[in-house]
Amino acid sequence: MLDKIKNSFDDAGKLSLFTARFFKEVFKWPFQLNEFLRQCYVIGYKSLPLVTITGFIMGLVLTIQSRPTMSKFGAESWLPSMVSLSLIREIAPVITALICAGKIASGIGAELGSMKVTSQIDAMEVSAINPYKYLVVTRVLATTIMVPILVFYADFIGILGGYIGYNVHGNASMYSYFTNVIEHLEFLDILPATIKTFFFGFFIGLIGCYKGFNASGGTASVGHAANSAVVTASLSIFIIDMLAVQITDLFFS
Amino acid sequence: MEKKSKHTWKLGMFVVIGLALFFVTLYFIGKSQNLFGSNFHLNAKFKNVSGLKVGNNVLLSGIQIGTVSRIEFITDSIVVVNMVIKTEVQKYIKTDAMASIGSDGLMGDKVVTISPGVVSHTIVSDQATIATVEAVELQDLMSGLKKSIDNAAVITKELSEFSVKINNGKGALSKVLTDEAFAERIDVTMANIETSSNELVSFSKTLNDKNSTLSKLMNDPFYANSIKNTLSGFEKSASDVNVFTAKLNNENGIVSKLLTSERLANSLDSTLINIQTGTEKLNELEEAAKHNFLLRGYFRKQEKAKAKKEKEALKKSSEK
């Protein structure tokens, strides 16, 4: 029992050190630009179809599901703004981050874990390449920047899905729908939501890398690293989300 | 390397489109809140802003022209609302424009409505303060409504009493409305009126006939002249009468004396007494004459004729 508690604190300490090392390394020359771009491509561009489908379905479903309640109040005309608000403030960031946690964190965890257990990371170190800089910094930076952009896509696609969902029963022109959406949006809806997606991206990359980097033992630990990366990343996303919403609520309302 | 560059443009496109979406959204939101473009400010002082919030819309003729940017107290009872409004509509807002706080739909947000003025032609300046119309509170509306509902209740109550009276009472109105005999009488009266009016029509026709006397009287100048003469004759005689009465009233005239003088009355009285005494004496004289032998025969004849006349009269009446 005591060991378990000690282990979890040990884990937290290691993660903190890992994070500190990231910030130390990120400002150090040289920067692995090509590897960074490749990771951006893999993380951002390759996740786009997944995010598009998820975002579209979320917008569509949210609109269709909200309609009965809204029409009970006779407030069907508020559907576009309500759906877009909930998408932009909460649903698109969290859903996209969870998708990325599933796809990217597990991928990074498995990739780095297998490199670790097959001693490729040690080999890098031997050949005078800083493995942390080459593997971790590029990936964490790539997720930090790509996840927010994926969230923008998800916002847009989700609102578009909301339009189609709205037109299942209603009838609104594209222009009036988007006017309605924009009319009820404020910077306060978009900026905190955008800022928290950077944290989501950062923690997805960081936790994936940490889990992979600290894999030890046989090939089984690769699977374990991937699994634990997804679980921890998803959990951290919800915790960050909660913190972000509370801070926003505290300062801006 | 070739493969990598292929990846790079896809990545570039992804990033550019993603960021473009973000900035376009930001731009539109900013535009809807008048953060870009040129704006000017207007102030309006309210006693009660009824839950108006920063960011609520400002409408002019129903068009959104700006937003509320600041709401603050200036004294303990007056709140000043500062509005950001597009410069392009400044020329439509004159100095006598009025601001009021309304509601955007039944459940919607509060809005500030600017109603354009009528008289002024001066355009408002930046940071100007415009007049306000106090919003009608729902509570005020309700209390007003309650008053009229109470009045309506009183009215309907009295109305119902009134109609009950009409239906059951014995007043004239009730009779008018319910009594059949009365209706018949009215019918008859109406018929009579009709007849008499018909007769009146024919009568007036006769009157209007040119040869009738009345018509001649009315229209013929000859008649008018003769009437005039008659009237002037009347006038003359009236003036004569006037002169006559004046003479009568004159104290020296006999009639006047007869009417007014006391001395004359006394002398008249004594004269009458003298005459009475005279006639008595005459009676005595006659009696004496009857007994006189010279005159006795005459008196006897007279008596006989009288008795004979009476006899004949008696005879006639018995025969009848």
Image (spheres, rainbow, N blue to C red):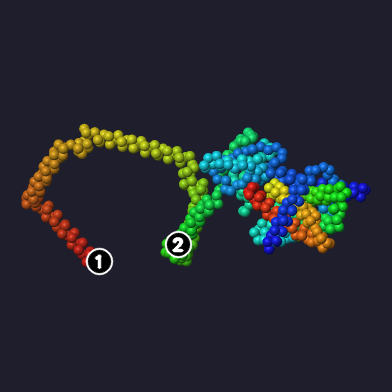
Instruction: Write the residue at 76% across / 48% down.
Output: A21
Pointer 1 local density, CA inside 10 Å: few below 14, some 14–19, many at least 20: few
Q: Nearer the viewer, mark 1 or mark 2?
A: 2
Give the mark nearer the N terminus: 1 vs 2: 2
Residue B99 placement (x, y as % from top left): 60, 42
Q: Chain of mark 2?
A: B
Question: Viewed as shown, does residue B60 lie left or right of B48?
Answer: right
Q: Chain of mark 1?
A: B
Most foreground residue, B2 or A128: A128
Question: Viewed as shown, does residue B184 lie left or right of A131?
Answer: left
| Label 1 in the same subunit as label 2 | yes
Instruction: Write the residue at 11% across / 43% down.
Output: B273
**Residue A125 shows up from this direction:** yes
**Residue A53 shows up from this direction:** no
Question: Viewed as shown, does residue A215 lie left or right of B122?
Answer: right
Instruction: Write the residue at 14% across / 36% down.
Output: B263
In the rendered view, tell whether residue B95 sits above or below residue A123.
above
The circle on residue B320 is: 1
Residue that label 2 marks: B161
Q: Quadrant of the C terminus of chain B?
A: bottom left
Element type where label 1 sits in the image:
loop
In the rendered view, tell whether residue A71 sits above or below residue B72.
below
Instruction: Write the residue at 49% across / 42% down.
Output: B219
Question: Viewed as shown, does residue A57 lie left or right of B259?
Answer: right
Pointer 2 local density, CA inside 10 Å: few below 14, some 14–19, many at least 20: few
Most foreground residue, A20 or A197: A20
